[in-house]
Image (cartoon, grey):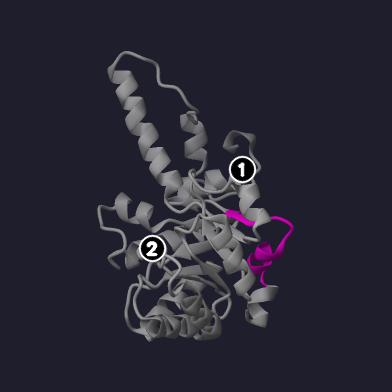
Amino acid sequence: MTESAHKHPFAELHHGDEPLLLPNAWDHASARALAAQGFPAIGTTSLGVAAAVGLPDGASATRDETLRLAFALGSGPYLLTVDAEDGYSDDPDEVGEFARELAAVGAVGINLEDRLGPPAPHAAKIAAVKAAAPVLFVNARTDTYWLGGGEADTKDRLDVYQQAGADGVFVPGVTEPRQIADLVRHLDVPLNILYTPAGPTVPQLAGLGVRRISLGSLLYRRALGAAVEAMGEIREGRTPGGVVPSYGDVDALSRRSDLTHSDEA
């Protein structure tokens, strides 16, 4: 990790007594609502951003939408890290420029995925981001478990990304405690794991040495599922259950003021 990154408050959250539990928002209201619950940092979810505007996730199609969301969220009373898919370009300089734009609107972190492509081009993107926006905490994701067969070349890829300047690494899809602990022992930078209801709990991940736990698209998908479920109950003549914020509560989330008002809790 670079010295400048380690001194940043967001980087320090990866070295506290507990792992950084990172909820992922998809719009201004969801980010403010989550921050109001005391989460010091908020991430974005590329699936939520893409689905909200009718574009595919993982297709490098949402560069503009992601930047607009970062602009809306970057001045919020929380630390913002942005899921930028693969950086929206194969050109490291273009990825570096996008990172510079994110930093300019207030983001403090970026997540970049390798999509199982060759490690060297991904490492070049990481290095370009660190050169263009040194303040950004670069979380380098490998998809060996998410899209591939698992352990085969995970450590080799992570070594390349660490050497390129990554401040942390992300291995979504790995849930076996032995494999997680082995990765923690191998790494020189914090390990980010994707929480899944079928996998280890937050305390279990903490015990394994994981330093960052992301929710990814889970909250967006839960929100969508709750909306569909509520409509089904209403159609069948039942009163839908679950917590429903009031109109005023949600309207208050659009105000760019602090989060101390009781009606925003």
Q: Amino acid at mark 2?
A: Thr
x, y (%) of residue 127?
49, 85
**How many numbered marks have been drawn onto this rendered protein structure?**
2
Residue position marked by numbered label 2 in the rendering: 66
What's the residue type where badge 1 is placed? Gln
Name the residue at 52% across, 34% down.
249
Residue 237 quadrant: top left
Residue identifier under label 1: 37
For image coordinates 48% across by 64% down, the residue present is 171
Determine whether, in the image, residue 111 is placed left or right of residue 117.
Answer: right
Residue 18 drawn in magenta: yes
Q: Report the residue at 46% width, 85% height from top.
A: 128
What residue is shown at x 65% (from left), y 48% (from top)?
203
Q: Is residue 237 left or right of residue 10?
A: left
Instruction: Farthest residue to the top: give it.
Output: 237
Q: Are marks 2 and 1 in contact (CB under 8 Å)?
A: no
For residue 184, which quarter of the picture?
bottom right
Against 145, residue 204 (above or below) is above
User: Is 261 or 32 nearer to us in this picture?
Assistant: 32
Residue 197 percent coordinates (x, y):
49, 43
Q: Residues within 10 Å of mark 1 (few under 14, many from 20)?
A: few
Can residue 258 be seen? Answer: no
Looking at the image, residue 96 sits to the left or right of residue 8; the answer is left
